[in-house]
């Protein structure tokens, strides 16, 4: 009896073990199924993710009124073109003779894949996250919940600004169009100018919350791929919530983070952007921003303007030389004036020195404080002009420059000589084509004035050494900032300080290390 009972107990234990094994296998299978199904398209998951927003729309209906063929249409109100949605999606689903032959959702899916819904931009999706991404970007999604499959159609229809004339960059001889806030309009504008099939436009998505589309643009066979790969790597490393301003992208691409000199060029002119791309540089366009980014940007490039290539080479060369002269003038003049009037009056001609002394009579402030005060006043006027509406800004500039300046001189708060010096330096700074470079120059102007107020002309020399040292140690994406002036092989001054005729500009810049170095032939 004992052995018989023991045998029955062992059988029960074996049965329990087998039962537990079967149950564990069923659990594993369910986990695997849920894991696999998690990647499929589910209308419930889409509603769970987007349904809390008031602009989310989800309508369920039947193909050709057949209750065996349920489908849901999903979109965001305001991002799509309602007329195109009705014409290309809803009407064919309700009236198409081709779809009437379908008896199952799988047959409908196959017919749509074969072109039953005739629309050029159609994508099949099998994951929730892909559908959600497309819908947020302005697509209409057809979701077949039973099959776990969706089709998205690019039917964007939101309001967009029309292409207009550039506002920040004046155009003399060139295209009057400019970049806008819509990414695809900008890429189409570039394609109109560069029609080669070698033009490559690669897309990245940056910003964990904004999910901003960003395009990297270059020409295959010309652009140095080391520069392209370096830019891609830096953009992939960009770990922030949003990229809604160009500054966040600039800071991440810049190699020298704490230099005030710009290492990236910006433009709202497609003609300038395309010219730089053809030269061998890399362009970046961000969705929502009406400008293009050009890298790398060396110092000499920032002193060039697109009109240089539309003018006679002699005229263009003289204008470029004038820019370099005015650049040094606007940086050095205020500091030089402080140095010679405070420490080296013997350098001033006698009659001029007497005129300066007479104008200074009755003014209580030292020349150093006068210059600093006028420079600060100039910066206040510039900032006020940028922030105020255009009509008011013009009035503020006139009142600030004429009324306040004249009143300060009359009240013996500022000497006339200082007003003239600061006015000349301010006007000279406007000759710099790049606004970011102009801002850097304005900051260095203060540094020069402070140095010159301490040790005179020795301070001016020290300032020159410091600024050259700062520029010389800068490098952007393997290109030295002072190229082509530090080029070892050849000084390519033909397209830097001066502009030679085009027949002499047969080669692209050496420092860009382009794959195709010849411009012509």
Image: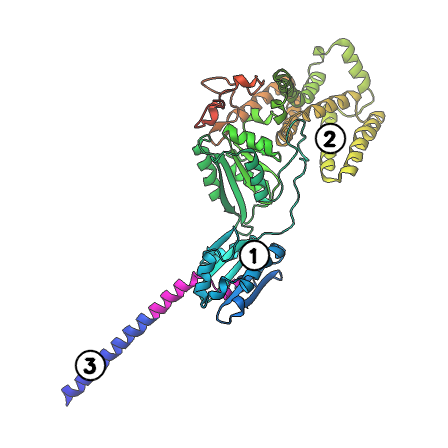
| Cα distance between the residues tagged 1 and 3 | 69 Å
Judged left or right of residue 480, residue 397 is right
Q: Quadrant of residue 447?
A: top right
| Magenta stretch in the rendered image | 27-47
Mark 1 or mark 3, which has the lower sequence index? 3
Distance in Å between CA atoms under marks 2 and 1:
59 Å
Is 302 placed above or below 3 here? above
Q: Quadrant of the N terminus?
A: bottom left
Query: What element does badge 1 sit on?
Result: helix
Q: Relative to residue 453, is residue 394 depicted above or below?
A: below
Q: Nearer the viewer, residue 4 or 407?
A: 4
Q: Residue at x 65, y 23 (%)?
A: 331
Q: Position of residue 441 (x, y in %)?
A: 63, 27
Quarter where residue 139 is shown: bottom right
- Residue 70 place in picture, x, y as percent: 50, 68
Rendered view: 231 above or below 441: below
Residue 199, image x, y percentages: 49, 35
Where does residue 351 sit, x and y in percent of width and height?
Answer: 78, 10
Kindly identify which residue carries mark 2.
378
Q: Which label sits on residue 88? A: 1
Residue 109 position by quadrant: bottom left
Inspect the magenta stretch and tell me whether residue 293 lies in it: no
Q: CA distance from mark 3 to mark 2?
A: 98 Å
Labels in figure, total: 3
Residue furthest to the front in view is 97
Pick whichever, 174 or 298, lies toward us. Answer: 174
Label 3: which secondary element: helix
What's the residue at 78%, 37% (across, down)?
Answer: 391
Label 3 or label 2, whichever comes before in sequence order? 3
Q: Which residue bears the numbered disc 3?
A: 10
Using residue 238 as the reference point, say whether residue 430 is left or right of it: right
């Amino acid at each position: 009896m004992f052995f018989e009972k023991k045998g029955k107990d062992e059988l029960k234990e074996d049965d329990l073990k087998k039962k537990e094994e079967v149950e564990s296998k069923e659990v594993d299978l369910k986990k695997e199924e849920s894991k696999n199904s998690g990647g499929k398209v589910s209308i419930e998951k889409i509603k769970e993710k987007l349904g809390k927003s008031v602009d989310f729309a989800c309508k369920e209906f039947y193909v050709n009124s057949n209750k065996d063929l349920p489908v849901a249409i999903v979109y965001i109100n305001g991002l799509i073109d309602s007329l195109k949605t009705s014409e290309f999606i809803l009407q064919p689903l309700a009236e198409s003779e081709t779809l009437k032959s379908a008896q199952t959702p799988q047959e409908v899916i196959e017919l749509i894949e074969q072109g039953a819904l005739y629309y050029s931009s159609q994508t099949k999706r099998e994951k929730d996250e892909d559908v959600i991404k497309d819908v947020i970007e302005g697509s209409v999604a057809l979701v077949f919940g039973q099959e776990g499959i969706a089709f998205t159609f690019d039917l964007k229809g939101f309001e967009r600004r029309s292409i207009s004339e550039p506002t920040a960059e004046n155009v003399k001889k060139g295209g009057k169009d400019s970049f806008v806030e819509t990414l695809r309009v900008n890429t189409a504008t570039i394609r109109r100018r560069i029609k080669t099939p070698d033009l490559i436009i690669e897309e990245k998505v940056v910003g964990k919350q904004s999910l901003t589309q960003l395009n990297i643009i270059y020409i295959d066979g010309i652009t140095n791929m080391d520069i392209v790969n370096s830019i891609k790597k830096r953009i992939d490393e960009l770990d922030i919530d949003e990229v809604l301003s160009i500054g966040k992208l600039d800071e991440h691409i810049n190699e020298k983070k704490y230099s005030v000199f710009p290492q990236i060029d910006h433009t709202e002119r497609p003609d300038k952007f395309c010219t730089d791309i053809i030269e061998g540089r890399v362009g970046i366009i961000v969705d929502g921003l009406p400008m293009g980014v050009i890298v790398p940007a060396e110092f000499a490039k920032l002193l060039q303007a697109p009109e240089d290539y539309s003018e006679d080479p002699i005229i263009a060369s003289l204008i470029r030389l004038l820019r370099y002269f005015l650049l040094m003038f606007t940086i050095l003049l205020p500091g030089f004036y402080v140095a010679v009037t405070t420490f080296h009056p013997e350098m001033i001609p006698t009659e001029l020195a007497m005129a300066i002394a007479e104008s200074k009579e009755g003014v209580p402030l030292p020349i150093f404080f006068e210059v600093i005060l006028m420079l600060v006043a100039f910066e206040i006027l510039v900032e006020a002009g940028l922030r105020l509406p255009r009509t008011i800004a013009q009035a503020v500039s006139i009142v600030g420059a004429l009324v306040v300046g004249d009143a300060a001189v009359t009240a013996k708060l500022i000497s006339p000589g200082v007003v003239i010096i600061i006015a000349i330096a301010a006007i000279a700074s406007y000759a710099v084509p790049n606004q970011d470079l102009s801002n850097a120059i304005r900051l260095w102007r203060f540094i020069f004035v402070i140095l010159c107020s301490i040790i005179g002309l020795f301070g001016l020399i020290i300032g020159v050494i410091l600024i050259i040292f700062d520029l010389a140690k800068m490098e952007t994406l393997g290109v030295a900032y002072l190229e082509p002036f530090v080029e070892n092989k050849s000084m390519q001054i033909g397209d830097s300080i001066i502009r030679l005729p085009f027949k002499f500009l047969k080669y692209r810049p050496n420092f860009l290390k382009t794959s195709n170095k010849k411009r012509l032939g």
